[in-house]
Image: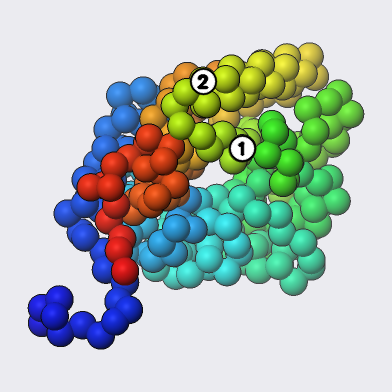
Amino acid sequence: MTIHDLDTPALMIDVKVLDGNLRKMATYCNDHKLALRPHTKTHKMPEIARLQLQHGAAGITVAKLGEAEVMADAGIEDILIVYPLWGEKKWARLADLAARVRITVAIDSLAVAAGISRAATAAGTEIGIRAEFDTGFHRCGWPIAASSMDEIQKMIALPGLRWDGILVYPGHIMGNQTIREHDIECENETMDALFELLGSASIPYPVVSGGNTPAAFASHRFHGLTEIRPGTYVFNDRNTVDAESAEFANCALTV
């Protein structure tokens, strides 16, 4: 089969470009001692997730419980779910999944944490938790305030949960390099305030997870990060080109 045999529209992945993108991000993270936990929302393909792991990723990130189940069925063993889970049925499924793989969830609600704790205790499993904080994107996350520390202390004490650390998503940092300079400064001020609150409350944070694709290669400049979760970098797109994080030659997906 050649390209001329394909019906249109056809979604095409250039494997060589894809591999180059994976290698570039893996090398960057290795050079800067950052764990790479790529978000698979861009491709949602176990085959590409395996390639990311082969290139040194510490695990993967998914948006939904169903995506985590698919990846676990495909043999992926370390999964972070970053979208809030609500409801007894989902919590029970999560607890069952924790019996098969190392599973961690982002949490910004004590009520959700309590529900997951009940499910984990009933199933006899352990579920990792990371407290998500809002640093400016205003989608999910606890506010950076002393009142949040009180709730997190209560969450950490719940049975069946493994405290891993904290998580942020700077989705508001999207501009080109010049625009990002100011945004990175603001983000660092916010993170410093968060670290001060956590320290005052004696809350440890072994993992500080953040990052996105537009600012991925500046991640070493963000205060305190130990892990990043870029997603779009596998294929790249017009947004990453506009953000000066990639060139059109680095776009692996075309129609």
Where residue 75 sits, quadrant-wise, is: bottom left
The answer to whether any part of residue 16 appears in the image is: yes
Dot 1 or dot 2, earlier in sequence: 1
Which SS class for mark 2?
helix
Identify the residue at horizontal 44%, vertical 47% (top origin). Answer: 239
At x 58%, y 24%, the residue is 183
Residue 108 quadrant:
top right
Q: Tell me the amino acid under the disc marked 2.
A: Glu
The numbered mark at residue 57 is none
Tell me residue 179's x, y (percent).
Answer: 52, 26
Q: Look at 44% across and 64% down and name the residue there.
A: 44
Is 31 in front, or is 122? 31
Q: Residue at x 66, y 16 (%)?
A: 189
Q: Residues within 10 Å of mark 1 (few under 14, many from 20)?
A: some
Q: Could you tell me which quadrant the N terminus lies in?
A: bottom left
Disc 1 to disc 2, C-alpha distance: 13 Å
Where residue 246 appears, as percent x and y from the top left, is 32, 40
Q: Is residue 89 left or right of residue 129?
A: right
Q: What amino acid does circle 1 point to? A: His
Q: Above or below — where is 127 with respect to 164?
A: below
Percent across and percent down for residue 47 are: 32, 64
Which circle marks residue 181 in the picture? 2
Question: Residue 172 shows which numbered tag?
Answer: 1
Nearest the viewer among 46 and 23 is 23
Secondary structure beneath label 1: loop
Q: Is residue 130 left or right of residue 61?
A: right
Which colour style is shown?
rainbow
Taking the image as shown, residue 89 lies to the left or right of residue 128, namely right
Q: Quadrant of the C terminus?
A: bottom left
Residue 58 visible in the picture = no
